[in-house]
C-alpha cells in the first residue's frame, strides 16, 4: 500500500514547471529547523496524542549504497501499514522522511512532527538474506518500548512488516477494534522492482522518471495483478516519465490504460483514483471529473492528508478559494511540514484577497523549503499589498523588475526590463507581466501566442493572480 505522498511535491506535477514564472524547485529541500515549527500559523497546529507515531526512514546498512531504495521503500511500506490502523495517528512519509540525514535527536523530531513515539531501524540486505532491526521509542524520555531484530529471507519481507506492526500495537497497549492490517503481497522480485521504481520516481529528473517507467513495467510483467505497481506506473507517466520516446498524448493514453487496469483489478485501491483525478485535470482539463475522483479516493482513505489536499487543489484551480483554504488547513493539521500544502494555502489566500495571511504563509514556506517558490509569491503578495519598496528589494529577476518599476511609476526603466523579458522569456511569462501592468490588449495578445505555442496549460490560468484584472473582459472566456 502506497500513500499519496507522490503529491509532494507534487501535486503540481511536471506541468507546473511549464507555467512557473521563475525557476528553481527542490522538492526534497525541506528545512527541519526548530523555528519553522514555531512559525506555523496557529490555525493549522495539530494536537499530539498518546497513540501518535512517526516512522523514520530505516538506515541502509547494506554494503551496496544502491540498496538505499530498498530500505527507504521498506520503511514507507511499514508506515503505510501502520497508517491503516484507525487507532494510530501516523505522520505521513513526506513529514517523516524530511528528517533523513539530519543530525537531530528523537525528542526534537517528535516535537516538530507532533508525535509521542518514533519507530526507527536499519536494513541490511545481501542477496536474498535480510536483517531488519526496529525499535520503538517514547519521544519525551527516549525510553525504548520495544526492539527486535529479524533475520529472514526476502520472501518473508511481508510477514516481517506485519510482525512489526503488531509489535507496535502491543507496545502501545492499543486495543484494535478490528483485525490487524495485512500487507498487499506480491512476488518478491516484483516487490523489489516496485520499491526501486518508487524511489526513482521521487527523484523527479527526466532520466529517473524514464527509468522508473521501465522498472514498473517489469514489475507488472512479473505480477500483472499487483495494483500498486499499475497505479505508480500511471502516476509516473503523468509526472513526465516516458517522454524520452513518446509524446504527451501517448504517455497520457498509457497512463489511462494503467489506471483502467488497476481499477478493474482492485476497485478499492484509493491511490488509483487519486491518480485518475490528476489525469482528468492535467491531461484532459476536466476539473469536475478530477474532483469527483479525489472525493472517491478520500472515501476509501479518509486519513490521507494528500487526498485532503488534492480536493483543495481542485478547488483552487476552479476558483473556489474558500474551500481550498479549508482543505489545505486540514491537510496541514494532519501533516505540518509539507511545503506544497503551504504553497497552495498561500496562493488560495492570495487569490481570495487575504493578503496578510498569504504573507505569513509564504514566509513560513520560505523558511521551511527555501527553493519551493515561496519567495516568488511573497514578492507577489508585497506587490499586491502596495508595499512597493519591499517588493523592489525582493525583485531578483527581469520579470519582477519590469512589473515593480511600472508600479512605482518609473515607466522608462520598467520598459527596458520588459524589452529584455520579451527577448528571452516564453509568451506565458510575457502575458503575465502585461497582466500585472494592467495592459489588457497586450495581455491577451501574448496569451494567444502562448496558446498557439502550447507553452502553458489552461489548468492554471483561472488561479493566476496576474490575470485577475482581465476576468471581466469579453475575451477572457476564450482562455
Image (spheres, rainbow, N blue to C red):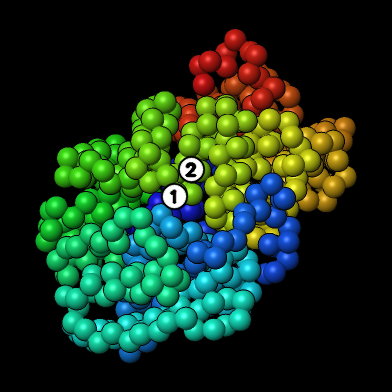
On residue 308, the disc is 2
Quadrant of the rendered structure where residue 287 is? top left
Q: Residues within 10 Å of mark 1 (few under 14, many from 20)?
A: many
Q: Is residue 452 left or right of residue 108?
A: left
| Residue 304: image tag | 1
Q: Secondary structure at mark 2?
A: helix
Of 401 and 25, which appears nearest the observer?
25
* Image location (x, y in percent) of residue 102: 57, 77
Image-based side of 273 in relation to 142, left or right: left
Let me know if residue 80 appears in the view: no
449 or 168, which lies in front?
Answer: 168
Give whichever of 190, 265 is nearer the camera: 265
**Which corner quadrant holds the N terminus?**
bottom left
Answer above or below: position of 83 versus 269: below
| Residue 167: image tag | none
Helix, strand or loop under label 1: loop
Where residue 369 appears, as percent x and y from the top left, is 62, 60
Q: Does residue 337 show up?
A: yes
- Front residue of 475/345: it is 345
Q: Where does residue 285 sit, x and y in percent of width and height?
A: 41, 29
* Residues at discs 2 and 1 in contact (Cβ within 8 Å): yes
Residue at 18% across, 55% down = 226
Alpha carbon distance from label 2 to label 1:
7 Å
Residue at point 25%, 38% (across, down):
256
Amino acid at each position: 500500500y502506497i500513500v499519496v505522498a507522490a503529491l509532494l511535491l507534487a501535486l503540481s506535477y511536471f506541468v507546473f514547471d511549464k507555467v512557473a514564472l521563475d525557476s528553481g524547485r527542490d522538492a526534497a529541500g525541506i528545512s527541519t529547523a526548530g523555528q519553522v515549527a514555531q512559525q506555523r500559523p496557529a490555525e493549522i497546529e495539530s494536537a499530539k496524542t498518546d497513540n501518535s507515531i512517526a516512522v523514520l526512514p530505516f538506515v541502509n546498512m547494506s554494503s551496496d549504497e544502491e540498496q538505499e531504495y530498498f530500505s527507504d521503500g521498506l520503511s514507507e511500506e511499514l508506515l503505510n501499514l501502520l497508517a491503516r490502523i484507525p487507532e494510530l495517528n501516523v505522520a505521513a512519509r513526506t513529514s517523516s522522511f524530511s528528517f533523513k540525514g539530519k543530525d537531530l535527536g528523537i525528542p526534537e523530531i517528535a516535537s516538530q512532527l507532533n508525535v509521542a513515539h518514533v519507530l526507527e531501524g536499519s536494513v541490511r540486505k545481501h542477496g536474498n538474506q535480510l536483517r531488519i532491526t526496529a525499535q520503538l521509542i517514547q519521544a519525551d524520555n527516549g525510553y525504548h518500548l520495544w526492539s527486535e531484530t529479524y533475520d529472514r529471507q526476502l520472501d518473508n519481507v511481508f510477514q516481517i512488516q506485519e510482525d512489526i506492526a503488531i509489535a507496535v500495537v502491543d507496545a502501545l497497549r492499543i486495543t484494535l477494534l478490528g483485525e490487524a492490517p495485512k500487507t498487499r503481497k506480491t512476488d518478491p522480485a516484483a516487490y523489489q522492482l516496485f520499491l526501486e521504481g518508487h524511489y526513482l520516481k521521487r527523484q523527479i529528473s527526466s532520466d529517473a522518471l524514464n527509468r522508473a517507467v521501465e522498472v514498473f513495467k517489469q514489475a507488472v510483467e512479473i505480477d500483472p495483478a499487483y495494483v500498486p505497481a499499475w497505479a505508480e506506473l500511471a502516476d509516473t507517466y503523468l509526472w513526465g516519465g516516458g517522454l524520452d520516446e513518446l509524446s504527451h498524448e501517448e504517455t497520457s493514453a498509457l497512463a489511462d490504460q494503467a489506471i483502467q487496469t488497476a481499477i478493474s483489478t482492485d476497485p478499492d485501491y484509493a491511490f488509483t483514483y487519486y491518480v485518475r483525478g490528476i489525469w482528468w485535470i492535467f491531461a484532459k482539463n476536466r476539473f469536475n471529473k478530477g474532483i469527483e475522483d479525489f472525493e472517491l479516493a478520500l472515501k476509501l482513505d479518509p486519513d490521507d492528508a494528500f487526498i485532503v489536499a488534492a480536493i483543495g487543489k481542485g478547488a483552487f484551480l476552479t476558483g473556489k478559494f474558500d474551500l481550498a483554504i479549508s482543505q489545505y488547513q486540514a491537510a496541514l493539521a494532519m501533516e505540518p511540514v509539507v511545503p506544497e500544502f503551504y504553497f497552495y494555502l498561500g496562493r488560495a489566500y492570495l487569490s481570495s484577497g487575504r493578503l496578510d495571511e498569504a504573507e505569513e504563509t509564504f514566509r513560513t514556506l520560505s523558511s521551511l523549503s527555501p527553493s519551493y517558490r515561496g519567495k516568488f509569491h511573497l514578492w507577489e503578495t508585497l506587490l499586491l499589498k502596495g508595499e512597493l519598496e519591499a517588493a523592489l528589494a525582493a525583485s531578483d529577476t527581469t520579470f519582477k523588475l519590469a512589473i515593480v518599476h511600472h508600479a512605482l511609476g518609473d515607466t522608462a526603466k520598467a520598459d527596458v526590463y520588459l524589452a529584455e523579458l520579451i527577448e528571452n522569456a516564453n509568451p506565458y511569462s510575457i502575458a503575465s507581466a502585461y497582466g500585472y501592468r494592467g495592459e489588457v490588449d497586450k495581455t491577451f495578445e501574448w496569451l494567444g501566442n502562448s496558446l498557439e505555442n502550447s507553452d502553458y496549460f489552461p489548468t492554471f490560468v483561472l488561479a493566476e493572480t496576474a490575470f485577475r484584472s482581465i476576468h471581466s473582459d469579453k475575451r477572457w472566456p476564450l482562455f
